[in-house]
Image: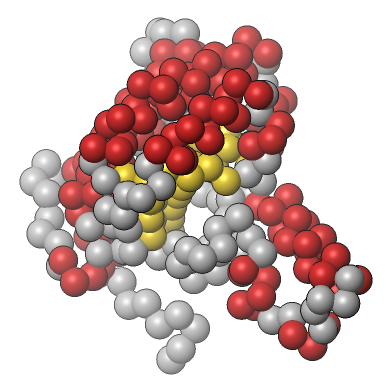
Amino acid sequence: MALAKTKLSVSEPSLDPSNIPHHIAVIMDGNRRWAKEHHLPAWEGHRKGAETLKQIVEACGDLGVKVLTAYAFSKENWKRSKEEIDIILRLFNFYLRHERENLYQNGVRFQAIGHIQEMGEKLREEFRKTEEYTAENSKLLLNLAVNYGGRTEMVDAVKAISQKVKNGELEVSRIDENLISQHLYTAGLPDPDLLIRTSGELRISNFLLWQMAYAEFWFTPLRWPDFKKSDLVQAVADYQSRSRRLGGS
């Protein structure tokens, strides 16, 4: 697995518009560490991280990316303190309400994947409203992974397929990779071409385990709140410099 280069200069590299990743996935890591390094409370890191996501959504739209899947809250994040979890949930609520019109005006369709049903009635309603309000947009899909776990997603897919077999709706012989993909939360979407992870960690942390089979990985030591459009451009430039054989020779 090749590691990404960090940005070599302040000038943005030129990109080939015919080779823009169709689907970019991001693990937005480092909010708490950014806050600690700046002698700020953890919630300030999460707030700054949310602002960064707004900028990267806009940048992806400008570049011609069609799908951005952002890992916002994992199943494992419930292990954090109640105070921090409450802050994160309030931030979700705030940005869903205040950014809904902005997403709509910028042609961004919003979708949440994960066990949203466990996020509380008020927050579920804000997710639903934002999805419905932006449903006709087509410039970019912002796919927000909330209360998400890759293994849980695969278990859910297996359960759904097994139930169809049990009900006589599906023959076992018809189960293949395409059928499994159709039962994932990302059904109907192309798999990620590029995974970006910030904050220097070199793992995918239970994120899109099935979908990431042939993605290019790009890691940076930058904390997520410090990630800028220029860093996104550098990641895409590095992606374009690689030879993607997708298992071929």
Q: Look at 81% across and 76% down and name the residue there.
A: 169
Is any part of residue 216 visible from this angle?
Answer: no
Of residues 136 and 119, the one nearer the viewer is 136
> Image quadrant of residue 145?
top right
Q: Look at 12% across and 49% down and name the residue there.
A: 12
Looking at the image, which residue sits at the far right?
Answer: 166
How many numbered circles does the render carry? Answer: 0
Q: In the rendered view, does 167 fall on the left or right side of 126?
A: right
Relative to 247, say whether 226 is above or below: above
> Image quadrant of residue 22?
bottom left
**Rendering coords of residue 95 (x, y %):** 41, 23
**Rendering coords of residue 85 (x, y %):** 62, 18
**Rendering coords of residue 231 (x, y %):** 25, 44
Is any part of residue 214 visible from this angle?
Answer: yes
Of residues 134 and 4, the one nearer the viewer is 134
Q: Look at 37% across and 77% down and name the residue there.
A: 244
Q: Look at 78% across and 62% down and name the residue there.
A: 160
**Rendering coords of residue 91 (x, y %):** 47, 19
Looking at the image, which residue sits at the far bottom?
Answer: 249
Of residues 35 and 193, the one nearer the viewer is 193
Relative to 38, say whether 152 is above or below: below
